[in-house]
Amino acid sequence: MCGLCGEIHFDGAPASAARLERMTDALAPRGPNGAGIVTRGPVGLGHRRLKIIDLSEKAAQPFVDTGLGLTIAFNGCIYNYEELRRELQAKGHVFASTGDTEVILKAWAEWGPAAVPKLHGMFAFAIHDRESGRVTLVRDRFGIKPLYLAETGKTLRFASTLPALLAAGDVDTDIDPVALHHYMSWHAVVPAPRTILKGVRKLPAATIRVIEPDGRSTDEIYWKPVFERSAEDLTRSGEEWRDMVLESLRTSVDRRMVADVPVGVLLSGGVDSSMIVGLLAEAGQKGLTTFSIGFEEANGEKGDEFVYSDLIAKHYGTSHNKIFIQSSEMMENLPKAIAAMSEPMVSYDNIGFFLLSREVSKHIKVVQSGQGADEVFGGYHWYPPMSGSTNPVADYAGAFFDRTHEQMATHLQPHVMANRDESLAFVEAHFAQAGADDPVDKALRLDTNVMLVDDPVKRVDNMTMAWGLEARVPFLDHELVELAGRIPAKFKLDQGGKGVLKEAARKVVPADVIDRPKGYFPVPALKYIQGPYLEMVRDTLTNEKARSRGLFKQDYLDALFANPTEHITKLRGSELWQVALLETWLQAQGV
C-alpha cells in the first residue's frame, strides 16, 4: 500500500517542497486516499496513502513523533504489528494511532536496526532522525515493496517508483549497457542495484542503508535464504515435509488477512492461488471474493484458464468474478500498462494484472496472490536439468537466457553492447557463493534472491498499485521460504515440480487442479504479434525517437518484423515484444 519519496541534500541546502510535491503527485495512483510532505532542513519526506489499517487521519504520513525526534514514510504492511505493539507498550511506549506505521517508528526507537528482523511483512520505509541527521532506508526481505534512488551531485532522491524520480528531474537517462545486457539475456530481469537507466539505482532487498548527513552510507543485509540442512532434515520423509509446509502456509495465509477492509484473492485456477482460497475457506472465511481474467485466443492458443478457476470458485462457494478482455481493449490499455511500469518488464502477465487490478479495485482494496511458489518450491522447467549438473552455470543459462552474448552482439548496436558476458558472469558469481551446494539449490537461491524480486514481485506491485490495490503474497512469507530451503531438492522436483507443495495441496483442494498440465498467464496476442499489434510495435521501433536512440541493429529488426512467430524465446516469449517493450517504455517515460 502507499507510495513514499524523499530528498536529502548533503551540502546543507534545504529540501525542495516543490520537487517532493512533483514526486508525490506521480505516486498518486499508489495512494489515492491522502498525501503529505514534511521537510526539516536538508531532509524532506513525501507520502501518498492507501488506507488499509487504521483508516483515521491519526495514521497519516509522513508520521512525525516529536518526542522521539523521528519521522517515517512507509509503504507496505506489517502483519505482526499488533503483537509488536503490545511488546512495545509493555516497555512503556505510548501510541497515538492504531496502525502499523507508528509501530515501526517505536520499534526503531527501542531496538534500532535490530527492529527490522522482527517485522513480518512487506515494506519499504525511510526514517529521519532529527538529532543525528541520519536517514535510514529499509526494504523487505524479498523486495516486495520497491525503493528507487537517484543521486546527483550533493543530492539524493528516492521514491517508490522510477517515474516519480523522473518527475523530480536531474536524472541521467542514458542506457546502462550492463543493465541492458541483463534485460536482453535474462527475460528482462535487471538485478539490483542497477536499472536500465544509468542515473537510477534501487535499494537491494533485505537491506538497511544508513545515510549520514555528509552523504556517507553503510549497508547491512539482514536476511538471506539459506539452503542448508541438518542431519534431522536429511532423514525426514516426504509426508513430514508435506505437513510442515501445509502448516506454515496456513500461518502465512492467515497473517495476510490483517486489514481494516475486506481481503479477496486473485484466482488463476492453478495450484498456488487455489490453495490460498482453500486455506481461507478451511479457516472459516465467509463471503470470500475471487477474481480471474482471460483474453481472446490467437494463433490457435487459448487465452484463459476459466475452467479451473470456475472449479475452485464453485467448490468453495466464493463470490467469483470472471473478467474477459477483448483484443481491442487490451491494445487500448497496453500503453497505460507500460507507462505504469517502474522498469520495462517483458512478461505478458503485466497487461493481465493491470486490467485485472483495474476491475478488482472497483470492489476491494486488498487481495492475496500466488506469486513466488514456483521459485520457492521448484516449479519451473529449468530446475530438473540442474539436478546432478556438472556445469550448473551453463545449464541454467541454457534453459533460461533468451540469447547468448554472441547472439546479442548481432542484435545490439555497439555503443550499448557490454564489453563482456555480464549476465553469465553474474550467475557464475552468485552460484559460487557459500550456502548452497546442490545445483538445484543454487538455481532456487538465485531465483529467490534476484529473478523473483525483479520480475514476478515487481510486476504484481506495479500493476496492482497502478489502481490503488494492495497485493499480498503468502508464498513469500520468510518463515515459509526458510522452511522450503531446508527441504531436499528431490521433494520439490517430484511430480514435474513443486511435488511437496502439490502433496500439501491434496489435503486442501480438488485433485483436478493439482494434476492438470502446468499453466501460465496466457496472452496469445503478445506472443504471436500479428495485424494491428505488429503495426504498433513497428511504429514504436522505427519512429524518430527510436532511430535517434539506436539500440538495435536494423537487420535484426527487419528479421523480427518479417516473421515474429519464428523468434520465440525459451521461456515462450516473443523477441519482437521484448525489444518493442523496452523502446515503448522509454518513450512512455519521456526518455
Image (spheres, rainbow, N blue to C red):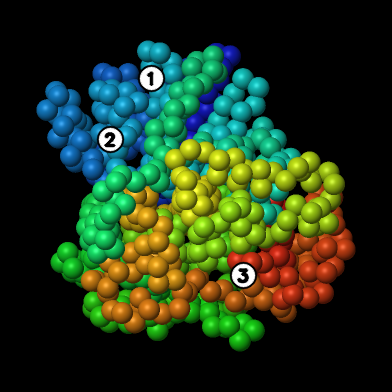
Q: Name the one closer to the observer, 381 or 17.
A: 381
**First in sequence: mark 1 or mark 3?**
1
**First in sequence: mark 2 or mark 3?**
2
Q: Which of marks 1 and 3 is in front?
A: 3
Which residue is most to the right? 555
For mark 3, does the 10 Å Cα neighbourhood hold few (<14), some (14 to 19), or many (20 or more) residues?
few
Residue 168 shows in the view: no
Residue shown at the point (24%, 77%) measured from the top left: 316
At label 2, the amino acid type is: Lys
Q: Mark 2 points at which residue?
A: 118
> In the picture, residue 67 is in which quadrant?
top left
What is the spatial separation of the Cα atoms under label 2 and label 3, in whole angstroms?
Answer: 40 Å
Q: Name the one closer to the observer, 229 or 78.
A: 229
Q: Name the residue under label 3.
A: 572
Residue 395 horizontal side relative to residue 249, left or right:
right
What is the spatial separation of the Cα atoms under label 1 and label 3, in whole angstroms?
Answer: 49 Å
* SS under mark 3: loop
Q: Name the residue under label 1.
A: 129
For mark 1, does the 10 Å Cα neighbourhood hold few (<14), some (14 to 19), or many (20 or more) residues?
some
Residue 198: x and y, percent?
Answer: 68, 37
At label 3, the amino acid type is: Arg
Which dot marks residue 351? none
* SS under mark 2: helix
Q: How many marks?
A: 3
Residue 213 horizontal side relative to residue 122, left or right:
right
What is the spatial separation of the Cα atoms under label 1 and label 2, in whole angstroms?
Answer: 20 Å
Q: Name the one closer to the observer, 321 or 24.
A: 321
Q: Name the one closer to the observer, 329 or 455.
A: 455
Residue 395: x and y, percent?
Answer: 61, 57
